[in-house]
Amino acid sequence: MTQLFNGLSSHMRCGDYNYGEAGAFIFCSCSRVIPGQSLGHASRCRFFSMTTAEIIAVGSELLLGGRVDTNSLFLSESLAEYGIEVRFKSVVGDDVEDIGAAVMNAARGVQLVLITGGLGPTVDDVTREAVARVTGKPLRLRPRALDSITARLQSAGRSVTANQRRQAFLPAGATLLHNTAGVAPGFAIQWKRCWVFCLPGVSHEVRRMWTESLLPVLRQDGLLSPAIETRTIHTFGLLEGEINDRIAGIIPAAGSFRLGLLASPLGVSVSLTRSQTIERRQTGKGRAVKSGPSLDNLMDDVIAELGPHVFSIDGQTMEEVVGRHLRDRGFTLAVAESCTGGLITHRLTRVAGSSAYVDRGVVCYDNRAKIELLGVSESLLKKYGAVSAQVAKAMAQGIRTRSKVDVGLSVTGIAGPGGGTTHKPVGLIYVGLATSEGTSTQVFRFHGERDAITLRASQAALDVLRHWLQVSFGEG
């Protein structure tokens, strides 16, 4: 980063750079960097071209586990669409001091602070109080907010209680953000050269308010930029390190591209992002120019290197990709599952229109079920065991024959945590595929907890089917 900025300094008046109070690296082309106000100064500078943001999720329940902060994911994606880069995310409990400290720290480093949660009527909803205290703006009753709350409750046949009336008290000078999807209004306030937006914690309310309330304020204040260009490539069958080694020579060592690798039981997602902040170069006439390969060209090179391990580049899930291939070819499918317990069939049938290609799914957990429902021979089970290539093959053949479908898919394995042996450890999975061309099996060895193993097994089985569909029809 320092090297990049030093390279730009010859076109600038001073090229000063500084570590501000928050420890954030601030660079500016102007004659000085103002201590304690470096972000506000930088936000006015023509070289600080991208708006930055921090998202703070409020709620003690988010710290205790069992709940996922989906609001931050939605806001990150939405902000990126308008060229706003999320630099930090944090989760804070329902404590006035902690929320205030988080807001104060965030305001030092970014231009937008988005807070979700803590605007409800109960005693632990203290975001309003925290923001009022840290900004020095006392809470004041906002008649328009109270009218909105009253109308919303009356439409549901309810009256305003003293606790619900609390939601109409906002920091003095704050902009009211109407909530047409719920009761609690949001608000926005400018403080220390940044905007602080406060939204309820209910997901569908956040989504509605983003469109109806936040965007107009951001647009009016000139904080929106061209979208951050991002491409995501979804893969299965390679580890993070293997992907990194394969594409290390493709991604420019210095330039405007950012590479991200995210591993999960469903595979590894490769994200490529073009950062306009780094990409802009100042010419003698003050024009910003682009250099180097385009993002799409770079994505094509990565896909070519990763080959058949890439199953999606447009956000489609594995079950959607498999479903599209089955539907396009007019094939029908039946699934026989043991260790996945119906997960494969569940994933397939979640896709709209799946009735066109999914015939049935059978859970054959016990050996007796494999014998009665699929026709697997008892002698085969005794000789090789339920977790074996031979039984996976018989299961795939049996479900295809008895269902009279084009494709039979099977999976059997040991999901754990118990049941494993030295020769057949936990995580051993066999997948069978029966088609008009014959029957094949593949073996996988996964690690992790039971849920992760079953999810990986379902993804592996679908990937086996995907490979066959693509290769058999000249796409692999």
Image (spheres, rainbow, N blue to C red):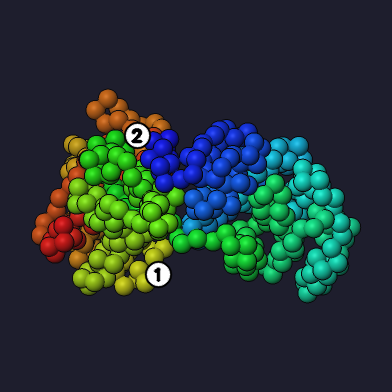
Residue at far left of view? 437
Q: Earlier in the sequence, mark 1 or mark 2?
A: 1
Near-viewer residue (410 or 120): 120
Number of numbered discs visible in the structure rendering: 2
Choose top left, top right, bottom left or bottom right for residue 382. top left
Which disc number belongs to residue 447? 2
| Residue drawn at x 35%, y 47% as measured from the top left | 257
Near-viewer residue (52 or 3): 3
Q: Secondary structure at mark 2?
A: loop
Say left or right for 30 vs 308.
Answer: right
What type is the residue that disc 1 sits on?
Ala
Say left or right for 445 vs 29.
Answer: left
Question: Residue 182: x percent and y percent?
Answer: 70, 65
| Residue drawn at x 79%, y 69% as measured from the top left | 148
**Local crowd size for mark 2, using a 10 Å CA cut-off: few (<14), some (14–19), many (≥20):** some
Give the residue pinned by disc 1: 352
Say left or right for 258 vs 247.
Answer: right
Question: Residue 80: x percent and y percent?
Answer: 48, 56
